[in-house]
Image: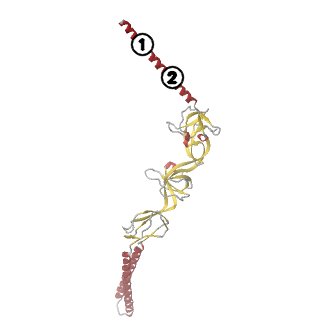
């Protein structure tokens, strides 16, 4: 009886194991079938493309140029400095205010310099009186020499005294001029017309000689100081035009090369080219600008720069072949602009090859796509 129970228990365990294995196999088959169905559905998914999602490689007249960038600088700037030491007065200008050339912007307290001018004038008057006395003595002695009453030596002495008095008077007159110049320098004037950009001192502050008081910039003439390599500088010429994008500005501006530095920068061997902004109205000195300097035009097979993808070791494009996405490696060439868009010359494509634009993003190779009637 006990042996029968043992065999029954063993048989029950075997049956339970068989049932568990059968259920596991059924569950796995169901999962595999569902996965296969999902893969099939994905394979059948077709991506619809809008008109703006596709483009074609075309031979275009590409504006070839050099990339330039840097801050805008005012052609004319001026620092108003104190020419004499003293207390700053009547200094009321603030940043952003307009000034005209010759306008009084501040004064240095003039009392000391007025006294020095009066002192120099009095010393000059005294020296002039001495010249008058020496002249009379000389005239008298000359008459006496002619009459034979005194020797010629006395006349020579009078002549020397007269020359000394005249020299002293001339030196006193020069001192008057120096004192007058110092008094005139107490008035600070704007050397150029422009806008106050920095206020470097305060009203009532005592300033020394050559102390900076005010900075003025003329915003009517702005330029970009572009640094180009030695090799690229050979293609830069006076009069060449550039299209620039200014930081914070909604629209681009045009510029032209007006000067090229004849010497390279020590160390980097770069050459500085100066581009004058054609319409500087509304711009400010110090804003960052970047763009392309046109150095020539060429007929090249080009595509928009944003259509080139670089998420692989080699640059590639996503082309459409028989309604399927394929990845094609390309060799990039010159860059430039066409109708305001950044373009790049490519090798490895044929004319009129249909490509995906950069706005579509990366798609897996082999993805099925469908072109709408407007996109074809």
Which numbered disc, 2 or 1, marks the residue that appears first in the sequence?
1
Mark 1 lies on a secondary structure that is: helix
Above/below status of 8 relative to 72: above
**Residue 14: mark:** 1
Report which quarter residue 175 is drawn in: bottom left
Closer to the camera, 140 or 376?
376
Query: Which SS class for mark 2?
Result: helix
Quadrant location, the C terminus:
top right
Provide residue 47's location: percent of width, then percent of height.
58, 35
Residue 367 placement (x, y as % from top left): 56, 32
In this view of the protein, which residue sits in the foreground, 307 or 22?
22
Report whether 12 appears left or right of 52. Answer: left
Left of 348 or right of it: where is 191? left
Q: In terms of depth relative to the viewer, which is nearer, 160 or 45? A: 45
Point out the residue furthest to the right here: 373
The relative height of residue 261 versus residue 49 in the rendered view (above or below) is below
Q: CA distance from mark 2 to mark 1?
A: 25 Å
Say which residue appears at 36% left-offset and 75% top-offset.
Answer: 112
Read off the residue under disc 2.
30
Asked whether residue 154 appears in the rendered view, the answer is yes
Return the x and y of residue 17 as percentages of the image width and height. 43, 15
Residue 215: assigned label:
none
- The residue depicted at 47 percent of the width and 17 percent of the height is 22
Quarter of the view holding residue 372: top right
Q: Which of the two discs, 2 and 1, sits closer to the camera?
A: 1
Residue 87 coordinates in the image, percent (x, y): 37, 70
């Amino acid at each position: 009886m006990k042996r029968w129970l043992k065999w029954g228990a063993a048989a029950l365990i075997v049956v339970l194991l068989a049932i568990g294995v059968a259920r596991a196999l059924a569950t796995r088959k169901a999962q595999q079938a569902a996965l296969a169905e999902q893969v099939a559905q994905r394979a059948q998914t077709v991506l619809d493309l809008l008109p703006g999602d596709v483009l074609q490689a075309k031979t275009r007249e590409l504006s070839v140029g050099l990339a330039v960038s840097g801050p805008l600088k005012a052609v004319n700037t001026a620092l108003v400095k104190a020419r004499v030491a003293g207390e700053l007065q009547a200094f009321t200008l603030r940043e952003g205010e307009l000034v005209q050339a010759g306008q009084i912007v501040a004064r240095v307290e003039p009392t000391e310099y007025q006294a020095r001018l009066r002192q120099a004038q009095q010393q000059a008057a005294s020296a002039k009186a001495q010249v008058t006395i020496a002249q009379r003595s000389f005239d008298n002695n000359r008459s006496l020499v002619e009459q034979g009453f005194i020797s010629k030596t006395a006349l020579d002495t009078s002549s020397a005294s007269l020359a000394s008095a005249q020299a002293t008077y001339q030196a006193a007159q020069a001192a008057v001029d120096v004192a007058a110049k110092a008094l005139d320098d107490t008035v600070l004037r704007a050397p150029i017309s422009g806008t106050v950009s920095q206020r470097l001192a305060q009203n009532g502050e005592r300033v020394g000689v050559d102390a900076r008081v005010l900075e003025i910039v003329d915003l009517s003439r702005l330029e970009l100081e572009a640094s180009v390599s030695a090799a690229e500088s050979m293609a830069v010429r006076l009069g060449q035009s550039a299209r620039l994008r200014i930081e914070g500005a909604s629209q681009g501006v045009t510029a032209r090369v007006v000067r090229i530095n004849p010497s390279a920068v020590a160390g980097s061997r770069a050459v500085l080219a100066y581009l004058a902004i054609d319409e500087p109205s509304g711009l400010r000195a110090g804003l960052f600008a970047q763009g392309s300097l046109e150095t020539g035009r060429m007929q090249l097979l080009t595509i928009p720069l944003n259509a080139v993808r670089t998420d692989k070791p080699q640059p590639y494009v996503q082309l459409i072949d028989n309604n399927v996405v394929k990845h094609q490696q390309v060799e990039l060439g010159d860059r430039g602009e066409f109708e305001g868009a950044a373009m790049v010359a490519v090798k490895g494509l044929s004319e009129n090859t249909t490509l995906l634009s950069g706005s579509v993003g990366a798609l897996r190779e082999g993805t099925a796509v469908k072109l709408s009637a407007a996109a074809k």
